[in-house]
Image: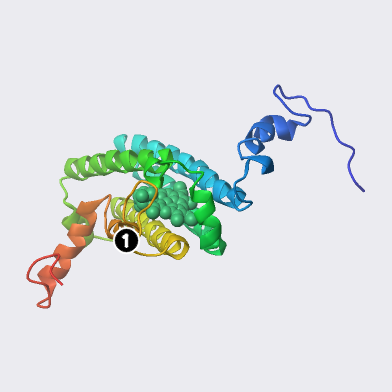
């Protein structure tokens, strides 16, 4: 039996409380209308970007909440929020997959409608970068106040709350690298190699970004552990 619909009681725009709370009228008006498309695949292109921005907005909020917990020494609460933020990055990495189905000839048409707009201007990614910097500083302070270095931490128990938070941050960093690897792969599949993006950046330079680290101390501590225990290390980092 289908339940009869109940009247909308919330304030706001829309015929139902679902529409009013979720603001679906506004949300669904944020994409170009078919009459405005330069190509029908613009809807796919816009939705993947717009939904990524929403997930990044959530990610930024989770990291801000985690930052407050780190400042208050509430390590377990911070860890849970960073875990959730990493899961959001995993989801937007999955989103990129569907762009593999975007034919290069279709994107070549869409590209003309993008002006000078580029992913480098993504507010979601920009805010995420500043959020990770703040978190990195706060975590380093927390370690210092515990009279520990990252190297000390990794010599300790993996079940230690600080160790677990460090690993949540490393996981988050890895999720950024995985997004970038997927983004580079998808971008070259769609526009090819040896070409410039809309910001005139060589597409191949995106691959170098995969190795950027937002929590460098935690990676350097791993390197130091390996170097201390192994004879088989490169004379200096960066040499192939
Ligand atoms: C057909 C799909 C895509 C192509 C061909 C593409 C291509 C590119 C290119 C060539 C650049 C270098 C900058 C430039 O000159 O424009 C770039 C950067 C960037 N793009 Fe995309 N992109 C695609 C999808 C996406 C999506 C869905 C997002 C999600 C927000 C995104 C976010 C970014 C970001 C954040 C950068 C800066 C580099 C970084 O931080 O790794 N791109 N993209």
Q: Give the x, y percent position of residue 61.
A: 44, 37
Q: Is residue 96 above or below residue 137?
A: below
Q: Residue furthest left?
A: 235
Q: Nearer the viewer, residue 16 or 222?
A: 16
Q: Residue at x 69, y 23 (%)?
A: 12
Q: Which residue is mark 1?
A: 204
Q: Residue at x 26, y 50 (%)?
A: 215
Q: Is residue 156 above or below residue 122?
A: below
Q: Split into 4 quadrants, where in the image is the C terminus?
A: bottom left
Q: Give the x, y percent position of residue 195.
A: 35, 59
Q: Is mark 1 within 8 Å of ligand 1?
A: no
Residue 52 visible: yes
Mark 1 packing: few (<14 Cα in 10 Å), some, or many (20+)? some
Quadrant for residue 238, please give it: bottom left
Q: Give the x, y percent position of residue 62.
A: 44, 41
Q: Residue furthest right?
A: 1
Q: Residue at x 30, y 41 (%)?
A: 135
SS under mark 1: helix
């Amino acid at each position: 039996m289908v339940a009869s619909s109940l009247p909308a009681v919330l304030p706001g725009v829309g015929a139902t409380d679902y529409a009013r709370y979720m603001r679906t009228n506004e949300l669904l008006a944020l994409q170009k209308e078919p009459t405005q498309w330069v190509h029908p695949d613009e809807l796919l292109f816009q939705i993947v970007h717009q939904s990524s921005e929403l997930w990044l907005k959530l990610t930024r909020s989770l990291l801000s909440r985690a930052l407050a917990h780190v400042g208050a020494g509430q390590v377990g609460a911070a860890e849970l929020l960073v875990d959730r933020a990493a899961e959001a990055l995993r989801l937007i990495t999955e989103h990129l997959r569907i762009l593999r189905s975007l034919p290069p000839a279709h994107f070549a048409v869409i590209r003309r409608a993008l002006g000078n707009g580029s992913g480098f201007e993504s507010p979601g990614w920009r805010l995420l970068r500043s959020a990770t910097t703040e978190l990195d500083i706060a975590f380093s302070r927390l370690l210092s106040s515990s009279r520990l270095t990252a190297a000390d931490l990794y010599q300790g128990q993996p079940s230690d709350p600080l160790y677990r938070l460090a690993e949540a941050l490393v996981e988050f960093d890895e999720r950024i690298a995985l997004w970038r690897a997927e983004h580079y792969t998808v971008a070259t599949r769609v526009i090819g190699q040896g070409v410039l993006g809309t910001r005139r950046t060589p597409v191949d330079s995106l691959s170098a970004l995969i190795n950027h680290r937002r929590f460098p101390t935690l990676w350097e501590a791993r390197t130091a552990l390996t170097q201390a225990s192994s004879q088989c290390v490169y004379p200096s980092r960066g040499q192939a």
